[in-house]
Amino acid sequence: MIFRSPFPDVEIPDVGLPELLFGDISGRAANPALVDGSSGRTLSYGELAAMVDKVAAALAARGVAKGDVVGIFSPNTPFYAVAFHGILRAGAAATTVNSLYTADELASQLRDSGATRLFTISAFLDRAEAAAKAEGVRVSEIVVMDGAEGHPSLADLLATDAAPPDVVINAETDLAVLPYSSGTTGRAKGVMLTHRNLVANILQVQQLIDVGEHTRVLAMLPFFHIYGMQVTMNAALYAGAAVVTMPKFELPEFLRVVSEHRTDRVYIAPPVAVALAKHPIVDSYDLSPMKVLFSGAAPLDEELAAAVRARLGCTIRQGYGMTEMSPVSHMIPDDRDDISIGTVGVIIPNMECKLVDPGTGEEVGEGVPGELWCKGPNVMAGYLNNRDATDATLDTDGFLHTGDVAVIDADGVVSIVDRVKELIKYKGYQVPPAELEALLLTHPLIADAAVIGVRDSEGEEVPKAFVVRQQAAELDAAAVMAFVAEKVAPYKKVRVVEFLDAIPKSASGKILRKDLRAREN
Ligand code: 4UU
């Protein structure tokens, strides 16, 4: 049984993303496009579009062309958007890197994506330089946006007299971005999203949300992650909103920016809702400008959301998506107060879904949980250089197998109820168990290891490692956690350790994660 969107299809024009966003800004050239939440420094739409052209021209003059990949390793600032759209405007694809990555994690993504240039900021230059020197990394130049000795700065790129290159984007086939996601299994992989994928998703959500030139969006979620990139940056710029950037989440600064910059649409992941519901300092700020609080990237607890609504008097909405879907497939439209905030709402236009029993492979109907499969113009082209992973995720009918278990009710409202994939989400960030398992196995005193997500006392999902010690080895939980913490971004840390005599495995040697999960209940 196919479930369709309750909305009619929207038309997806055959244009590249920069063309969609900046092709006709004549009516809004003087309006604010990006505002630095810390300094208040503002780029108007006219300035942004001109800078994007300059960066594209400078990159083209340096030999960057269609088919190339350029990395961005930076926190959210207005200049992130300049670099991002300059890269796409030059015909290259942007691979966006998590700001918390260690030099080794950064090197892996640069190597795998084949990036030849990297944009960063001076505060991240140590990690960027170390990664650029790593074996197999092809980065030949690091642009330090705010400037650093021995590297070109963004100002240097903007000083070019060259005209923007005459690249013809084939929206259907040309890659726009290569964010990394582990998908349903294994390590992080490059997700090939075309211009059409990104353009489609922006237009698919547009009529479900009240975002326009009157809107001020808070962009605290990182632009490197698909949610920040597409929902808070690109969809907002398409609509002509002002995007107020924050480099990271800190509660007092977040509250100050909402109140002083009067952001009326605020995008968050669920842990921020916990702070908004409970923290005493919330009362010290005037949060009345915040009209809509939108949550995604992990399950939002309905009671928690209701507590935030009661305390702050704002409208709460939820969306569901996945990097591989550019990212949105379901959301609660702005005007649907009747839909429970504990659900992810309805199927967005141009998409269809199936629910499939993970045990039997049979399609199920209303009211019965099944793995959610989705199809639409926003679904990725595949994983970079990884045919097997692509084939395991995207079927021959074009349905993406999400690895999430959902239920759909008689009104077409969808709830996410479980996950059948390995992926762990810590505060909305992806933690791929396969990566931690491989790292644990490099420890000389560890014979075998498996990692799953468990709930901590606050209900937050955290990575737990099951570890088999080498014979007679002395190794305690603290040592295991310290070993991992030293090598990975902080959000990937193992937070619980249990020692076992053996890791449960199938005959073919696959870790039986469901047996490990069953031990937890
Ligand atoms: C339960 O996290 C994302 C995308 C987030 C997003 C998308 C559209 C947020 C708001 C929005 O409007 O992408 P990934 O690739 O990092 O992680 C995808 C996974 C999903 O497969 C699911 O397991 O993150 C989980 N997830 C959710 N789970 C994402 N959103 C939700 C949600 N409820 N609302």
Image (spheres, rainbow, N blue to C red):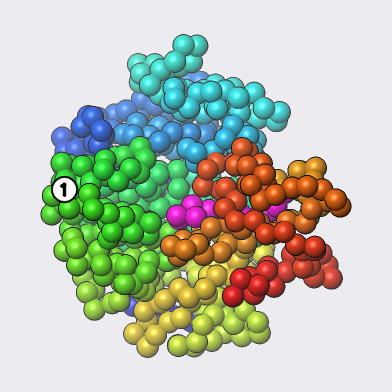
**Residue range highlighted in magenta:** 426-438
Q: What is the x, y in percent for residue 442?
A: 76, 43
Q: What is the x, y in percent for residue 237?
A: 28, 45
Among the 4 quarters of the image, the one containing residue 33: top left
Q: Is residue 148 above or below residue 269?
A: above
Residue at the image point whose x is 47% and y is 63% from the top: 457
> In this view of the protein, which residue sits in the foreground, 253 or 81?
253
Q: What is the x, y in percent for residue 477?
A: 66, 51
Residue at the image point whose x is 25% and y is 63% from the top: 308
Residue 147 sits inside the magenta stretch? no
Among the 4 quarters of the image, the one containing residue 47: top left
Is residue 483 in view?
yes
Is residue 388 in view?
no
Q: Relative to 242, is 230 on the left or the right?
A: right
> In this view of the protein, which residue sits in the foreground, 430 or 241?
430
The amino acid sitting under disc 1 is Tyr
Residue at the image point whose x is 43% and y is 82% from the top: 408
Residue at the image point whose x is 78% and y is 47% from the top: 474
Q: Is residue 54 above or below residue 221?
A: above
Ligand 1: give its quadrant: bottom left
Residue 427 sits inside the magenta stretch? yes
Q: Is residue 345 above or below residue 90?
A: below
Label 1 neighbour load within 10 Å: few <14, some 14-19, many 20+:
some
Among the 4 quarters of the image, the one containing residue 424: bottom right
Residue that badge 1 annotates: 285
The image shows a total of numbered marks equal to 1
Q: What is the x, y in percent for residue 508?
A: 83, 67
Q: Relative to 133, is 427 on the left or the right?
A: left
Q: Could you say whether the residue bearing mark 1 is in a helix, strand or loop?
A: loop
Q: Is mark 1 within 8 Å of ligand 1?
A: no
> In this view of the protein, which residue sits in the foreground, 112 or 433?
433
Q: Residue furthest top?
A: 149
